[in-house]
Amino acid sequence: MEQTAITAIRITAAQAIQKANSGHPGMAIGSAPAAYTLWKQMRHNPQNPHWANRDRFVLSCGHASALEYALLHFFGYGLTMEDLKQFRQLGSKTPGHPEYGHTRGVEATTGPLGQGFAMAVGMAMAEAHKAAVYNREGYPIVDNYTYTMLGDGCMMEGVASEAASMAGTLRLGKLIALYDSNRITIEGDTDITFREDVAARFAAYGWQVLDVPDGEDTAALAAAIAEAKAEAGKPTLIIYHTVIGVGTPVAGTAKAHGSPLGAAGMLAMRAHYNWHHPDFDVPQEIYDHYNTLTTPGTEAEADWNALFARYAKEYPELAAQWQQDHAPNLPIDLLQDEAFWHFEGKAASRVSSGEILNRLAARLPNLFGGSADLAPSNCTYLKGLGDYSAENYAGKNLHFGIREFAMAAACNGIALYGGLRTFCATFFVFADYLKPALRLSALMGLPVIYVLTHDSIGVGEDGPTHQPIEQLAMLRATPNTLMFRPADAREVAAGYIAALTHSGPTVLALSRQNLPLYENSGPAALQGAYILREPKGTPDVILMASGSELELLYKAADLLSVQGYTARIVSMPCWELFEAQSPAYRESVLPKSIRTRVAVEAAIPFGWERYTGDNGKIIALTGFGASAPAEQLYAHFGLTGEAIAKAALETIKS
């Protein structure tokens, strides 16, 4: 029955791909025994895919999605055979790669290779932290494993190396990775590109490495998983060796990787596995077998619910905190919190951010994050809350090392795990290193907060390699992402509120240089753009900017007033929030009747034309920065009050 159940997975996955005439059958077929063996012993409840203490499973090689869909179907997650027939079709529950929030039971959106593995590392980090915070003797409230399956492609991507090194350093004993070593990629045998000793590499990272020579041997696979679970002090990599597309005419070749088997190939596969049922028809006895495998998970959740009820009586404060951590909405009202909004004097927005993070940590005990080795510069250290490490999983300050990509991917995993509010930090220019993971944050709707400091040529002497120019436009172009560039401390506070209430990532681009505190700033910044200074009567020109350049608008407005012209100053920290406002509000800030407009930003001008119009002007950068003190750079690149006033006069007169 076990072998028949595995064959059902293989045939169903291959049929779905064949019907769609699109997909990747090779690994879905070759890894079916390992996947079956893993899911058979995993603790999960198909009746409640969101049970907090379930084991997590991430298919890092998302191109093998047909394998996961077949598993979800047979293990009773509500994915029907009709859904499998609609594989890769518009609007189906079975898209080309697994999508979190779209298909019931899918724990993470995967496909960009290596990122699923890194997200699994983040999930394991979250499990270890929550266990340290909540578990008490006799009450293992948090006690699950995180499993991930990956292939040769994931192993080659750099993010997997970053994440594996991090996991080994942290000794994440409840992280178990199963690596299908089939030695085939799209271009052919991996010998042309990938000859390293993976086992030695992971052993050097601090992992336990187990080898299963025959990926068809379910007994050996089960023994390896049991041995992995017995090792509490190290993450485990199980290398199992398979033949890609085993049992098909293209077995062991690159042709098995990314193309349907074809009608003749499907017939040959059926004959090899002695499968004589019609397409998409599976005998009831196989479903009956799978039903017996789901019962332990249902019972495990019932036991956990009873355990938590006893825990709540024994530790009512911890239980109440648990419920607050898992509440869908922000459990505190920051808008009415006067202390949260109180600031004095000039400060770099990165410094204001650090102060706000610590205020939030006092109000939100589940805040959990850190920096890519830049906490002193990013100002992201949560004071008095300890350092997360292999020796102290209760610490709330994460140290990701110089691993920006893995940092962001791990934060996605932390957010996916549930019950934690996470942030990560680096220099804004290194958004280039973490952008692929930020894109998945946006695609999955994960509220990861990206604290990206040193946001302009204001970085100064470090020069053009460290001065972000095009990154604002890049992130503004990313759907479901709030790109927030605040002009003072109160706008930073607004940015954090926006981040904590947004169903997607928020980027806070923060300054190195000191910024003034504006008289009328504050909660209005949550509207994305607002009038910060208004003259009497109808203004002659609208001056608009984000971040540190707002100070230049005040200088320009004063110069214009000497010549008898008035200016409205508009702060635009977040275009996305502004575009979400009503047409009436947007018209009140940028009325169509005032066509004389000047926009200023220490970045490329891309995108500002939507707000300046054909008659307006944009003062921005058209190339990279340079190495010099910040004030010299602003003057050198024409970002001055005088230049803005001149542009405004030209616009008015034209």
Image (cartoon, grey):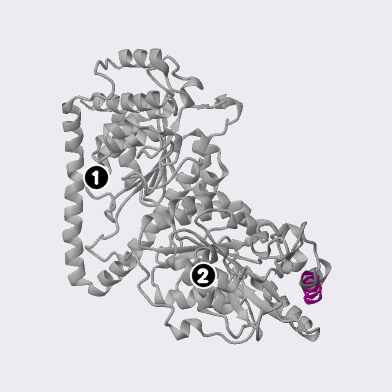
Residue 26: quarter of image: top left
Q: Earlier in the sequence, mark 1 or mark 2?
A: 1
372 with respect to 386 (left or right): right
Quadrant showing the C terminus? bottom right
- Amino acid type, residue under disc 2 in the picture: Ala
The answer to whether one can see residue 301 in this image is yes
Q: Which residue is mark 1?
A: 46
Task: Label 1: state its secondary structure.
Answer: loop
Q: Is residue 213 magenta?
A: no
Q: Position of residue 16 (x, y in %)?
A: 36, 27
The answer to whether one can see residue 381 in this image is no
Distance of label 1 from label 2 (alpha carbons): 47 Å
Residue 27: quarter of image: top left
Q: Position of residue 255 (x, y in %)?
A: 49, 20
Q: How many numbered marks appear?
A: 2
Q: Nearer the viewer, mark 1 or mark 2?
A: 2
Tell me what residue is drawn at x 45 percent, y 50 percent. Answer: 119
Classify 10 Å Cα crowding around label 2: few (below 14), some (14-19), many (20 and above): few
Q: Position of residue 84 (x, y in %)?
A: 32, 32
Tell me what residue is drawn at x 33 percent, y 64 percent. Answer: 328
The image shows residue 61, relative to residue 571, as above or below, that is above
- Amino acid type, residue under disc 1 in the picture: Pro
The image shows residue 482, relative to residue 337, as above or below, that is above
Task: Label 2: state its secondary structure.
Answer: helix
Q: Main secondary structure of the magenta part?
A: helix
- Res. 584 mark: 2
Residue 240: quarter of image: top left
Where does the magenta region start and end? 640-651
Q: Position of residue 145 (x, y in %)?
A: 33, 49
Tell me what residue is drawn at x 29 percent, y 67 percent. Answer: 322
